Image: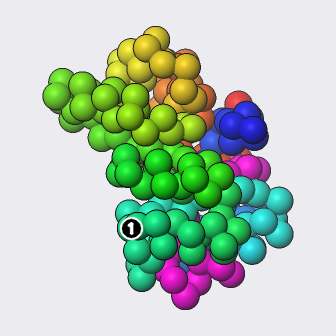
Amino acid sequence: MIEEYTAKKIAAAIRTEDDFSTALKSRVDVIFLLYSNIINVGDRVKAVHDAGKKALVHMDFAEGIGKDRAGVDFLARQGVDGILTTRTNIVRMAKEFDLVTVQRFFLVDSHSLGTSAESIKLSKPDIIELMPGIVTKKIREFASITDTPIIAGGIIETEEEVRAALEAGADIVSTGEFGLWDLEI
């Protein structure tokens, strides 16, 4: 099942309406809805599915949707395929609703590396996203200590950065740069 999310090597990270329209027409299979809200999430998920793609909502950024069991339940009822979050408890809740879980980690120092590894053991996300995605040294390190698929995301702006992240061991790259969404890698 997770292979469906990592088959193509680019995911679209959506922040604006223009980005959303472009992503629907692109080659990506997976769209990360970074700025959804309680009013538009159902329509956005339907449009993503109508385009033959998977929709994952970033729970931490979703306006008007609780960061709790009711919020996860609401998103599941809207038909989302999965969620993104930095929160271990949200990952665990989302699993109860059979949603694909992506847990995001910001690697800023050696302490964050250790706490991230502990969180992975506790929450057991389906996929982890390491940010910023240009930290290939840490992608390689995580790839050597876990068999959990890895998304490299954040500050990836060029084809060379996409290729470097994939070569370091990332399974997929998440980028807001629409010019990269149609790369054939």
User: Quarter of the image holding residue 173?
Assistant: top right
Query: Over which residues does the magenta segment extend?
Result: 27-43
Q: How is the protein colored in the picture?
A: rainbow
Q: Where is residue 108 in the image (x, y as percent from the top left)?
A: 21, 35
In the image, 176: left or right of 49?
A: left
Question: Foreground residue, 163 or 91?
Answer: 91
At horizontal 48% and vertical 19% (from top left) the residue drawn is 146
Q: Where is residue 124 in the image (x, y as percent from the top left)?
A: 48, 35
| Residue 129 in view | no
Q: Position of residue 128 (x, y in %)?
A: 48, 37
At horizontal 40% and vertical 67% (from top left) the residue drawn is 68
| Residue 116 in view | yes
Magenta-span inclusion, residue 60: no
Q: Quadrant of the N terminus?
A: top right
Say which amino acid is labelled 1. Answer: Lys
In the image, 128: left or right of 54?
A: left
Residue extending farthest to the top is 144
What is the secondary structure assignment of the residue under circle 1? loop
Magenta-span inclusion, residue 42: yes
Q: In which quarter of the image is the C terminus?
A: top right
At horizontal 73% and vertical 34% (from top left) the residue drawn is 3
Question: Foreground residue, 106 or 8?
Answer: 106
At horizontal 46% and vertical 11% (from top left) the residue drawn is 144
Question: Foreground residue, 125 or 182?
Answer: 125
Q: Mark 1 points at which residue?
A: 67
User: Quarter of the image holding residue 67?
Assistant: bottom left
User: Quarter of the image holding residue 79?
Assistant: bottom right
Residue extending farthest to the bottom is 39
Q: Where is residue 151 in the image (x, y as percent from the top left)?
A: 52, 36
